[in-house]
Amino acid sequence: MEVRRIQILKEGLEVAIVHTLREGNKLADFMSNIVFSFTSTNFTYYNNFQELPTEAKTILNMDKSQIPNLRIRRIQNENYAQDR
């Protein structure tokens, strides 16, 4: 149903829908994790930059400075370390 609704909404418009990895929008990922970490129904509002959590400010400043967010994965192959 949701896909059909999106198709209806984009009819007659030039729309491009693309997937962005978590690293591509690290601030949105961080903020969504804050939302899901609260168990109460109270909402938290951030009205300006100074009210943001420190980590959110860091992510935002890195984004403004165009510093890339890299995903670093640990090598799964145990033999790799022994070969070196």
Image: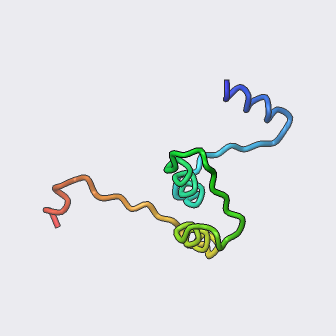
From the viewer's perspective, is 72 left or right of 57?
left
Residue lying at 84% horizontally and 39% vertically, measured from the top left: 13
Q: Is residue 68 above or below residue 73?
A: below
**Quadrant assignment, res 50:** bottom right
Residue 10 position, x and y percent, is: 79, 35
- Can residue 24 be seen? no
- Can residue 73 be seen? yes
Q: Nearer the viewer, residue 19 or 56?
A: 56
For the C terminus, give its image quadrant.
bottom left
Residue at the outermost top position: 1
Residue lying at 58% horizontally and 60% vertically, measured from the top left: 27
Residue lying at 60% horizontally and 56% vertically, measured from the top left: 28
Residue at the outermost right position: 12
Residue 82 position, x and y percent, is: 13, 62
For the N terminus, give its image quadrant.
top right
Q: Nearer the viewer, residue 7 or 60?
A: 60
Q: Nearer the viewer, residue 24 or 28?
A: 28
Q: Is residue 43 above or below residue 2?
A: below
Residue lying at 68% horizontally and 43% vertically, measured from the top left: 17
Q: Is residue 78 above or below residue 11?
A: below
Q: Nearer the viewer, residue 71 or 84?
A: 71
**Quadrant assignment, res 83:** bottom left
